[in-house]
Image (cartoon, rainbow, N blue to C red):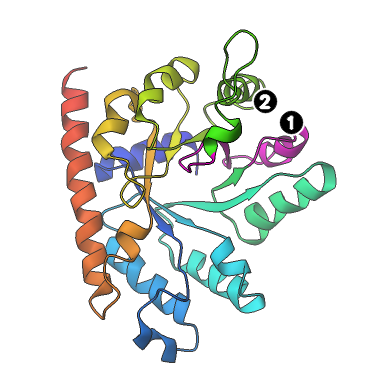
Amino acid sequence: MNRESLISFIRDQQNFLCVGLDSDMSRIPKHLLDFPDPVLEFNKHIIDATKDHCVAYKPNIAFYESRGAAGWESLAATLDYIPDTHFTIADAKRGDIGNTSRQYAKTFFETLDFDAITVAPYMGIDSVSPFLEYDDKWVILLALTSNKGSQDFQHLTDTSGVALYEQVMRKSQEWGTPDNLMYVVGATHPEAFQHIREIAEDHFLLVPGVGAQGGTVQDVCDHGLNNDVGLLINSSRGIIFASDEEDYAEKASDAADQLHQQMSTILQAHFSKR
């Protein structure tokens, strides 16, 4: 999906919600365990319940590959079930060099045909450029993540006081453009969004950390929105595990709808000022 199509879909849907399919076998409702593929059955009902309230889905690859061949089959079938209208993100956090990175790109952009993949930047351009060679595909580079451990390295500063995450964002813009490069910026760092928009004015930001991790949509939007919206706010556990009973899909729909309505109100106010 190219940038123009993504922006158009966000405007049509009046939301920028990404549903994270962190489909942990140990947490899905017990009655699904009788199905041949419990994770796929769970995902299908979640997708049916949320597709009208979101613009993107983000399977976390760890919850699939940890199950071996069966997990990869669940992932492929889940990807096939997601409507073609929706943006798809492989939350794989890959990061290697040369031929290895090229094989990762082939896995997620050819074999599985995701629209985007999360990539770790630590090894530099060698680990990122093979993903950027694909037309209408996206690299989502880890910049300022939502976890507590982000303090260990991402906030470290050089002698001039520039944080590592900022250096990553500035340098990587020499490799990609707003048409194929996004950044992960956690909702747990609302104070950073104004500065991040100064660094990457036109790039999309994938924002985890809303809901279960404590971030809020309003805090992110106050400084994170740009002229093209420029945000994909992800919620995983807060939606897909809103209930662990047989009403899990209904509760997931309610949780997604609540975020949808909040985003719609914010967008109306945002664009009415322009």
The quarter of the displayed image where residue 194 is located: top left
Q: Is residue 162 above or below residue 203?
A: above
Question: Which image quarter is the C terminus in?
Answer: top left
Residue occupying the point 62% across, 67% down? 65
- Callout 2 environment at 10 Å: few (<14), some (14 to 19), or many (20+)? few
Q: Nearer the viewer, residue 216 or 85?
A: 216
Residue occupying the point 52% across, 27% down? 178
Q: Is residue 225 above or below residue 111?
A: above
Amino acid type at circle 1 is: Ile
Q: Which residues are magenta?
A: 120-149
Residue occupying the point 38% across, 37% down? 188
Residue 126 highlighted magenta (yes or no): yes
Residue 121 highlighted magenta (yes or no): yes
For label 1, the SS is: helix
Residue bearing the label numbered 2: 175
Residue bearing the label numbered 1: 125
Q: Nearer the viewer, residue 162 or 41?
A: 162
- Callout 1 environment at 10 Å: few (<14), some (14 to 19), or many (20+)? some
Which residue lies most toward the top here?
Answer: 160
Q: CA distance from mark 1 to mark 2?
A: 7 Å
Is residue 181 something that shows in the picture? no
Which residue lies most toward the right here?
Answer: 99
Asked whether disc 1 touches disc 2, contact meaning CB atoms under 8 Å apart, the reply is yes
Comparing labels 1 and 2, the label whose residue is closer to the camera:
1
